[in-house]
Image (spheres, rainbow, N blue to C red):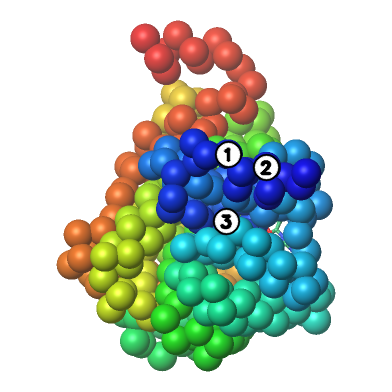
Amino acid sequence: MGLLTALQDDASIPEKRVLVTGATGLLGRAVFKEFKLYDWNAVGCRYNRARPDFVRVNLLDFAAVRKLLQDFKPHVIIHCAAERRPDVVENEFEAATQLNVAASGNLAKEAGMVGAFLIYISTDYVFDGRKPPYREDDSPNPLNLYGKTKLDGERAVLQNNQTATVLRVPVLYGDVEKLEESAVTIMFEKVQFSNKSANFDHWQQRFPTHVMDVAAVCRQLAERRMQDPSIKGIFHWSGNEQMTKFEMACAMADAFNLPSSHLRSITDSPVMGAPRPQNAQLDCSRLEKLGIGQRTPFLIGIKQCLWPFLIDKRWRQTVFH
Ligand SMILES: NC(=O)c1ccc[n+]([C@@H]2O[C@H](COP(=O)([O-])OP(=O)(O)OC[C@H]3O[C@@H](n4cnc5c(N)ncnc54)[C@H](OP(=O)(O)O)[C@@H]3O)[C@@H](O)[C@H]2O)c1
C-alpha cells in the first residue's frame, strides 16, 4: 500500500484536504505544521530530501503530478516548491525556469481539474524597489532572473487557473535545519565570531518575515476561500519592521547579549551577485482589510530560531533567566 493510500484509508482523517509542495523547505515545513495543527488532512511533497512521511514527487513529472492530485483530490494546494536562490537562478536559468514557471503553470492547471484552490508563493523581488510600498496591482519590474522567473510563474498560474491566488512575501526566516537555509539566519555565524570584523549590507531595506506568520496567512486565506469564492488574485504579506542586514545582525547580537562592535555597515549598493531592489516594501492592506494576518516581532522570532545555534551557551544565564 502506498503512503497516499494509507493516509486516505485512515477513517479518522478529517475532511479538509491540503497538499503542500516543497514541504521539506523552509516555508513548506511551517505551512505543513500549521495546517496539521488546525486539523487539516495534510499531505506534504518532497523531492530530494529524505522525509519518509512525505510523498516524493518531481513537479517536472507532469504525469506523476496528475496522478497525485487525482488520487488525493485536495481542496487546497499551497505551492511552496521553487528555486529561490537568486544567484543559483542566474547560473541555472533554464532549470529554474522549468521549476518556477513550467511546473507552477502545470500544477495550477491540474488544480483546476480537481477543483482545488491553489496558493502560489511569490516574492517581493517581482518589484524594482524604486517606489515603495507596492500594492498588488502595481506594475512589477524584476531586477534579477529569480524575480523574473517568479513573475512568469505568477502569470503561468493565473493564466492556467483563474481562481488561483498568488501570495507575495519578502525575505523569510524561521526554524532552520542549518543557518544557511535563510538569508537572515545565515548572518548569525559572523555575528557570533566577535574576534573578526564582519561587513553587512546597510543599503537594501528588508522586512524579515517569520515563516509561521506566512503559514498562518495561507491557512486563514484557504479557510476564508472555502466560505467565499471571491477570494482570488494577488495578495501581499510581510513583517512590518524595516531593517537592513546590518540592523538584523545588530538585533541578533542584542537578542543574545553578544558583542556587536565587530559588526560593520556597508552603505554602498552591492556590486556582487544578482541585482536586488533597494526597497520592495509590500503594502498588505488587502489582506489586513479581510482581517487576515499574523506578525511575530523580529526580536522574539529570531531569538527563538537562533537559540539552537548559539555556540557559547554561557549566555544562557543572561538570556533566559
Ligand atoms: N526563502 C525566502 O527568503 C523567500 C522569500 C520570498 C519568497 N520565497 C518563496 O517562498 C517559497 C518557499 O521558499 P523556501 O525558502 O521554503 O524554499 P526552499 O527552502 O529552498 O525549499 C524548496 C523546496 O522545493 C522542493 N523542490 C525543489 N525541486 C523540486 C522538484 N523538481 N519537484 C518538487 N519539489 C522540488 C525542495 O524539495 P527537496 O528539498 O526535498 O528536494 C524544497 O522542499 C518559494 O516559492 C520562494 O520563491 C522565499
Q: Which residue matches tag 3?
A: 20
User: Is 300 situated above or below 155?
Assistant: above
Question: Does residue 36 show up?
Answer: yes
Q: Residue at x 54, y 48 (%)?
A: 42
Residue 175 as seen in the image, left or right of residue 164: right
- The three-letter amino acid code for the residue at tag 3 is Val
| Between marks 1 and 3 in the image, the one whose residue lies nearer the viewer | 1
For marks 1 and 2, give the CA distance: 7 Å
Q: Residue at x 78, y 74 (%)?
A: 63
User: Is 266 situated above or below 280?
Assistant: above
- Image location (x, y in percent) of residue 276: 57, 73
Q: Which residue matches tag 1?
A: 10
Q: Disc 2 or 3, which lies upstream in sequence? A: 2
Q: Disc 1 or 3, which lies upstream in sequence? A: 1
Say which quarter of the image contains residue 291: bottom left
| Between marks 2 and 3 in the image, the one whose residue lies nearer the viewer | 2
- Image location (x, y in percent) of residue 219: 39, 54
Asked if labels 2 and 1 touch by Cβ distance under 8 angstroms, the answer is yes
- The three-letter amino acid code for the residue at tag 1 is Asp
For marks 1 and 3, give the CA distance: 19 Å
Per the image, label 1 sits on a secondary structure element best described as: loop
Q: Nearer the viewer, residue 19 or 133?
A: 19
User: Is 310 situated above or below 23?
Assistant: above
